[in-house]
Amino acid sequence: MFFWFLTLSIVGVALVFDSPNLDYRLVAFGSLLPIIEIFFGGPWIGHTLIFPVAVMSFIMLVARGKRLVQRRWLGLPIGLFTHLVLDATWARTKVFWWPFMGFDSLGGSRVPETEWWPMNLVLEIIGVIVGCWLWKKFRFKDKTYREAFIREGKLIELRK
């Protein structure tokens, strides 16, 4: 599932936060990052609540006193959080709450993204449809708007 995470994370965060200084490329990257655990034998730390919290804490500490830097980089943990919501990791208590529910709950099983194969196609189609809406809503047909996203991660004209 690629478009499901990519488009819904960008749209959801843009509509909820409406932040001009957030880098939406980092939101997209964060929402896709835990998918790599497919290649490592099951859900690992990327599917736990502690991972985005640790990333967010790291950003806040490293960029202490630099609000614009913090705001821009907060897109990464926000994207990680959206992944947890969109793949329903929160419903897998032992993985989501690791290590608080035990240390042996990671790995050795399938990541949530691979468990719903019949539904994955439907979710990807929804992701493509949302992507088409995103393209129109944020005027990516216009080179200026598209380049603002590509170069700076900005979505221009969020309120229109």
Image (tube, rainbow, N blue to C red):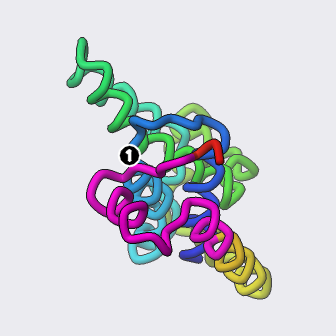
Local packing at callout 1 (Cα closer than 10 Å; few below 14, some 14-19, many 20+) is: many
Numbered marks: total: 1
Q: Position of residue 28 (x, y in %)?
A: 46, 58
* Residue placed most toward the observer, 1 or 38: 1
Q: Kindly identify which residue carries mark 1.
A: 23
Q: Is residue 72 left or right of residue 88?
A: left
* Residue placed most toward the observer, 19 or 88: 19
Q: Position of residue 123 (x, y in %)?
A: 73, 76
Identity of the residue drawn at 38% across and 70% down: 143
Vertical position of residue 155 compared to residue 141: above or below: above
Q: Is residue 121 left or right of residue 77?
A: right
Q: Position of residue 83 (x, y in %)?
A: 57, 55
Circle 1: residue type: Asp
Secondary structure found at label 1: loop
Identity of the residue drawn at 21% across and 24% down: 62
Q: Is residue 86 magenta?
A: no
Q: Where does the N terminus fall, quadrant-wise?
A: bottom right
> Which region is colored magenta?
131-157
* Residue placed most toward the observer, 121 or 28: 28
Q: Is residue 153 magenta?
A: yes
Q: Is residue 48 left or right of residue 70?
A: right
Q: Position of residue 7 (x, y in %)?
A: 59, 65
Identity of the residue drawn at 54% across and 65% down: 139
Location of residue 4 by image quarter = bottom right
